[in-house]
Image (cartoon, rainbow, N blue to C red):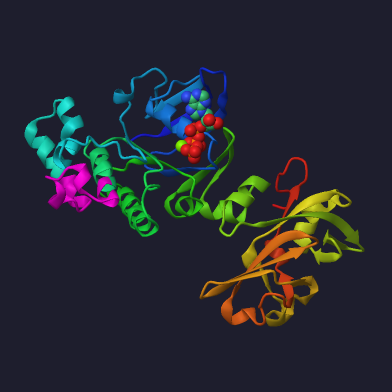
Amino acid sequence: MAAVTLKGIEKQYDNGFKAVHGIDLDIKEGEFMVFVGPSGCAKSTTLRMIAGLESISGGDLHIGGERMNDVPSKDRGIAMVFQDYALYPHMTVYDNMSFGLKVAKLPKDEIDQRVREAAEKLQITDLLDRKPAEMSGGQRQRVAVGRAIVRKPDVFLFDEPLSNLDAKLRVSMRVRITNLHKELKRAGQPATMIYVTHDQVESMTMGDRICVLNQGRIMQVDTPMNLYNFPANKFVAGFIGSPAMNLLKADLIQEGDSVMVQVGSDRFTLPQEKAQKVVSQVGKSIWFGVRPEYIGNAETHPECTANSFNSEVITLERMGFEENIYFEVDGQPCSARIPHEKAGESDVGNNYHFCIDMNKCHIFDMESELNISL
Ligand SMILES: Nc1ncnc2c1ncn2[C@@H]1O[C@H](COP(=O)(O)OP(=O)(O)OP(=O)(O)O)[C@@H](O)[C@H]1O
Ligand SMILES: [Mg+2]
């Protein structure tokens, strides 16, 4: 059991490139923390510094209350699972899983018990005599996780462990890993897990909390739902959620008591509560953010005709339950996600009557890109 604390953590590589710019993060004991962000944002670098596979250029790393900056990887109480599994190809599954325990000179019975227990949990008992080349990607992935479990680490570190698997297998492995986290908690052996992914669906469904990174800096740390509903800035707003939030260049204007967002010739009125928060910015250009699911068909929402507009349907994706409708507002690309039964006449080329639920919109400062409507 161990909390992981990063204080002002920095990384400068030998070639002078600064990959991590001072990260502060408290990961609680037994927490499932996800690192998410675009390629190159330093997810792996940060994880590898926690693991002790990469030196720390500045700041302090504590695991279980102990400063770990200069402690060798093997003494940090961690186990890591990589994207490429890194199994020993000439060894059986049993030997792959038991190797680290043998090196650590655990008694033979204890090793056998731990390997069989982990194999049971991951349903790979009947594969124990196979070699990696004789298994599917998903089976190899389970062995890689099994090899981490047998060590009973305080902290599990995962670096995109599912990215080599096909979509269906990813879902089942995703569930397996979150269940493992829950099981360990129930069994009174909670493990802290840090899980790196660039897949925002994985991050939303797996994490107790998510740490969104961009260019070596933390953009926001919060629960999945809070990130979704209250993004602190434009980056998080655009990154979390699929399809992505619409972000339109717009102007804030005032008419009488109403504060409105003007996009081209269309005007949308902010609800009182949001208007109060942004009224000092009237007259300025802003980013107007609205998720596709909060743009609807005005014909089936008579209550929101005040904030409606017309636009030609450019592309239509019928997904079954819902439709993704692509169009433009003031020349800027925009999308709506509307349940099929409410979508009406959504064929390409139609002049469609959209409406926006302004209670759910966000206003971001044009320069700082911070959310000023929270
Ligand atoms: N050994 C190195 N020397 C110099 N720069 C490096 C080194 N390793 C990584 N970098 C740079 O550091 C930055 C962060 O890399 P990192 O691998 O941590 O990103 P990532 O978020 O894991 O990306 P991905 O999603 O592609 O795996 C990148 O700009 C990368 O080019
Ligand atoms: Mg990486």
User: x, y (%) of residue 301?
Assistant: 69, 79
Q: Nearer the viewer, residue 53 or 40?
A: 40
Residue depicted at 47% across the width and 21% down the height? 56
Task: Residue 236: give x, y in percent of width and height.
Answer: 61, 47
Give the magenta range: 117-140
Does residue 156 appear in this view? yes
Is residue 132 rendered magenta in the image?
yes
Q: Residue 128, percent across and down?
A: 14, 46
Q: Judge whether residue 233 can be spotted in this image.
A: no
Between 202 and 64, the residue placed more toward the observer is 202
Tell me the quarter of the picture where residue 331 sits: bottom right
**Residue 322 point in image, percent of width and height:** 55, 73
Q: Residue at x 15, y 49 (%)?
A: 127
Specify whether residue 47 is painted magenta.
no
Q: Is residue 119 left or right of residue 333?
A: left
Q: In this view, does 305 lie to the left or right of 168?
A: right
What residue is at 27 percent from the left and 38 percent from the top? 148
Is 321 placed above or below 368 here?
below
Q: Is residue 4 above or below residue 34?
A: above
Q: Which residue lies furthest to the left in this view?
A: 109
- From this view, report whether residue 45 is shown above or below residue 266: above
Name the quadrant of the N terminus.
top left
Toward which corner of the image does residue 18 lie, by quadrant?
top right
